[in-house]
Image: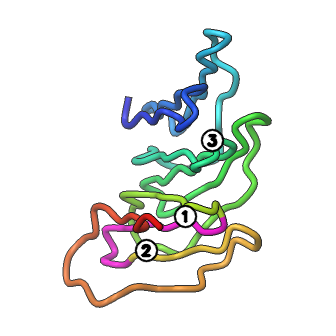
Amino acid sequence: VNCASYSPDGAFVLAAFLDCAARVWSLHKGERIHILHGHRNLIRCASFSPDSAYVCTGAFDGVAKMWSVLRGECLRTFAGHDALVNSVAFSEDCTQVLTSSTDSTARVWNVSDGQCHVLLKGHSAALHSAVFSAG
């Protein structure tokens, strides 16, 4: 397992494996409900949205993807990093996704259209984590 994440509502667990896919389990049903295929390389990180409706994965292919937890389908692909994505995070209102990368940048993506609307650069080394501040 490369990474695992627990949904804020306590209903789901996601784990990413060495096969470039992630699995979502329903804790209420006690079973796997989806296998999320779509990355071309290992998944490095994953995070649920605050409302537990979505999950975002980031991978060694330099791409982050946003998935529907209930349907198991990819809703958005956030492509633009030149190296692996180290962290992914949703904004509190679920309208933005923040990614950090070993390409020394962080990016803020618009969930509605999948476009990067803020590029944060200037670091001289890899960014291993980025989060939105609360409130």
Q: Nearer the viewer, residue 117 or 132?
A: 132
The residue labelled by disc 1 is 91
Where residue 125 sits, quadrant-wise, is bottom left
| Marked residue nearer the N-terminal end (1 or 3) | 3
Image height check: is 2 above or below 30? below
Q: Tell which residue pokes out farthest to the front in this image.
A: 135
The residue that appears at 56% across and 65% down in the rendered structure is 97
Image position of 35 (left or right of 60): right
Q: Tell which residue pokes out farthest to the right in this image.
A: 71
| Alpha carbon separation for disc pair 1 and 3 | 12 Å
| Marked residue nearer the N-terminal end (1 or 2) | 2
| Marked residue nearer the N-terminal end (3 or 2) | 3
The residue that appears at 39% across and 67% down in the rendered structure is 100
The residue labelled by disc 2 is 82
Magenta stretch: give its range. 95-105
Residue 57, x across and y down, in percent: 53, 49
Residue 39, x across and y down, in percent: 58, 49
Residue 79, x across and y down, in percent: 58, 70
On whether residue 104 falls in the magenta region, the answer is yes
> Which class describes the residues within 10 Å of circle 3: few (<14), some (14-19), or many (20+)?
some
For mark 3, give the secondary structure: loop
For mark 2, give the secondary structure: loop
| Alpha carbon separation for disc pair 3 and 2 | 29 Å
